[in-house]
Image (cartoon, grey):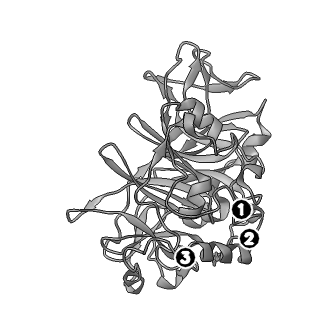
């Protein structure tokens, strides 16, 4: 594992990469300050807990000028590969994890909405945020080369403040204790996303960088021990268990994907949960590979895809169940895809609201949300 991570650091700082924009180092000497908020951090961050991950600032180069392809033109993705799905209004984009693993950050725009799309391979967290305007300047983000709880620490190039990717909070620098606004993001298989968004946009593999896209430089990581994690792993689950984490009204819940799989029928599972006094429905579907298992991402073990939705459509509360072939709602008998769209029945074409939920490894989710409950199959 250490060898693999060294290879990543070397590859991401190779000659010919674009120069880093800003040092990102000045924030490291700032006084720690409280980062209050509903996203998890409620105590000052000790600067000693923010550690070097190896590469220098922007040594893992973010993508600042992304280009996109039509789904029909993409021939370099396998059906089971994970993509990070982000949608703002009517604009739907897929960010293949085979690209995000090597770049971690994409500074992008959805129409008039600036968005930063992020992926931390050490935590398996794919998260998107709106990019705010601070003091008249639109923030854009880079990789600081630092880790906090083994999680990606971003920095904004305008103030060089540090931000925890897992929570979207400024943890050091001028902008503490600002929080970024989340944009719902989902890890789905390429096949499922493509079928849901045939007119969408796919981040192009022509990034301007020379990387072994499709290779997993962290082979075996999702069955190993977290890299540079200095805390104690919450003993309720193995550290690199894949979970879907939901937060709402100062409550948090983690749903282990392997637990969802135990109640699956024909590759589908569904459950309803209460978090912070609100109900959410969680869909799980087999067919999505782990990006952090085998040396080649398409060869990774099947961990499935899990997404949380608000269980309402057309102003009506819906309940969901399995019928031996997938997920249907009990009120109309409509059939639903993993993307939260009714694909057959009276509600065909209706889209459920995507809830704020984050795919993560357990160690990271529990470190940022120590109050979290853990869901277990009935």
- Residue 27 got which mark? none
Q: Farthest residue to the top: give it.
A: 346
Find disc 2 in the rendering and name its residue: 225
Which quarter of the rendered picture does the N terminus lie within? bottom right
Camera-side mark, 1 or 3: 3
- Residue at disc 1, secondary structure: loop
Tell me which numbered mark, 2 or 3, is placed earlier along the sequence. Answer: 3
Q: Residues within 10 Å of mark 1 (few under 14, many from 20)?
A: many
User: Do the numbered discs 1 and 2 sit on residues whose CB atoms are within 8 Å?
Assistant: yes
Which quarter of the rendered picture does the C terminus lie within? top right
Q: Residue at x 55, y 81 (%)?
A: 52
- Residue at disc 2, secondary structure: loop
Find disc 1 in the rendering and name its residue: 240
Along the line of sight, which residue is nearer the eye, 84 or 171? 84
Residue 374 screen position, x and y as percent: 66, 53
Residue 103 screen position, x and y as percent: 53, 63
Find disc 3 in the rendering and name its residue: 13
Residue 148 placement: quadrant? bottom right
- Residue at disc 3, secondary structure: loop
């Amino acid at each position: 594992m250490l060898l693999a991570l060294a290879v990543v650091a070397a590859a991401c700082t190779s000659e010919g990469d674009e120069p880093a924009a800003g040092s990102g180092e000045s924030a490291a000497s700032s006084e720690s300050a409280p980062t209050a908020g509903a996203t998890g951090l409620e105590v000052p961050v000790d600067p000693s807990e923010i550690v070097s991950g190896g590469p220098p600032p922007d040594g893992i180069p973010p993508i600042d000028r992304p280009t996109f392809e039509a789904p029909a033109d993409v021939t370099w993705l396998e059906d089971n590969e994970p993509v990070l799905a982000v949608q703002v209004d009517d604009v739907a984009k897929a960010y293949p994890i085979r690209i995000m693993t090597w770049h971690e950050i994409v500074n992008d725009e959805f129409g008039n909405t600036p968005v930063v799309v992020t992926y931390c391979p050490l935590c398996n967290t794919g998260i998107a945020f709106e990019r705010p305007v601070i003091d008249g300047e639109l923030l854009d983000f880079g990789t600081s080369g630092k880790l906090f709880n083994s999680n990606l620490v971003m920095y904004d190039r305008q103030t060089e403040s540090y931000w925890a990717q897992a929570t979207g909070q400024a943890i050091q620098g001028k902008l503490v204790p600002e929080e970024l606004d989340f944009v719902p993001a989902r890890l789905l298989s390429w096949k499922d996303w493509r079928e849901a968004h045939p007119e969408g946009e796919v981040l192009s593999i022509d990034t301007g960088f020379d990387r072994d896209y499709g290779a997993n430089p962290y082979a075996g990581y999702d069955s190993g021990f977290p890299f540079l994690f200095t805390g104690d792993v919450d003993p309720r689950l193995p550290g690199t268990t894949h979970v879907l984490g939901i937060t709402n009204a100062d409550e948090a819940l983690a749903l282990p994907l392997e637990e969802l799989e135990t109640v699956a029928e024909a590759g589908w599972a569904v459950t309803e949960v209460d978090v912070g006094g609100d109900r959410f429905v969680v869909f799980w579907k087999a067919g999505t590979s782990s990006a952090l298992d085998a040396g080649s991402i398409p060869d990774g073990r099947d961990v499935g895809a899990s997404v949380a939705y608000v269980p309402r459509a057309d102003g009506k509360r819906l309940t969901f169940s399995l019928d031996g072939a997938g997920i249907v709602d009990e009120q109309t008998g409509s059939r639903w895809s993993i993307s939260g769209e009714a694909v057959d029945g009276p509600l065909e074409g209706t889209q459920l609201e995507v809830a704020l939920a984050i795919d993560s490894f357990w160690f990271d989710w529990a470190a940022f949300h120590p109050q979290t409950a853990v869901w277990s199959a009935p």
